[in-house]
Image (spheres, rainbow, N blue to C red):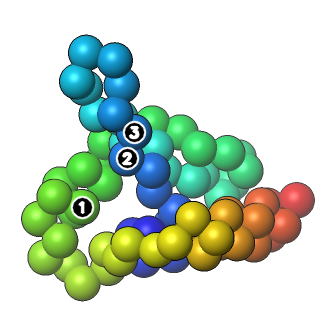
């Protein structure tokens, strides 16, 4: 999580990394590389690792807000 935004770091074939952030306006995950440096540096105090259950709960809450 970066603040209230669920963000997935996904390893792709070939060793590349994709950053997928939840877009509350669209109700889905989208590629968004601006979070990469925030996660890598973690100097904002906004980055926190959560369990899969916490992550899914946050996504569901945001999906409900979007609809």
- Is the C-beta separation of discs 2 and 1 under 8 Å? yes
Residue 54 in percent (x, y) is at 60, 75
Q: Position of residue 48 (x, y in %)?
A: 35, 76
- State the separation of the CA atoms marked 3 and 1: 13 Å
Give the residue at x 70% y 72%.
57
SS at mark 3 in the image: strand
Asked if residue 45 shows in the view, the reply is yes
Identify which residue is drawn at 25% across, 15% down: 14
Instruction: Label 2: state its secondary structure.
Output: strand
- Up the image or down, 17 lies above or below 21; here it is above
The residue carrying pointer 1 sits among few (fewer than 14), some (14 to 19) or many (20 or more) residues within 10 Å by Cα, namely many
Looking at this rendering, what residue extends furthest in the bottom direction?
Answer: 45
Kindly identify which residue carries mark 2: 9
Answer with mark 3 or mark 1, whichever residue precedes in sequence: 3
User: For mark 1, what is the residue?
Assistant: 39
Drawn side of residue 30 relative to residue 60, left or right: left
Question: Which quadrant of the figure has residue 29?
Answer: top right
Q: Residue at 31% of width from left, 42% of height from top?
A: 33
> Which quadrant holds residue 28?
top right
Describe residue 8's horizontal placement relative to residue 33 as left or right: right
The quadrant of the picture occupied by the N terminus is bottom left
Q: Which residue is mark 3?
A: 10
Q: Nearer the viewer, residue 19 or 55?
A: 55
- Tell me the mark number nearer the camera, choosing from 3 and 1: 3
Q: Residues within 10 Å of mark 3 (few under 14, many from 20)?
A: few
Marks 3,2: beta carbons within 8 A: yes
């Amino acid at each position: 999580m970066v603040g209230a935004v669920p963000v997935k770091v996904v390893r792709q074939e070939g060793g590349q990394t994709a950053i997928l952030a939840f877009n509350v306006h669209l109700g889905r995950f989208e590629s968004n590389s601006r979070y990469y440096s925030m996660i890598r540096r973690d100097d904002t105090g906004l980055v926190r690792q959560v369990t899969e259950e916490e992550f899914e709960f946050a996504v569901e809450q945001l999906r409900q807000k979007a609809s």
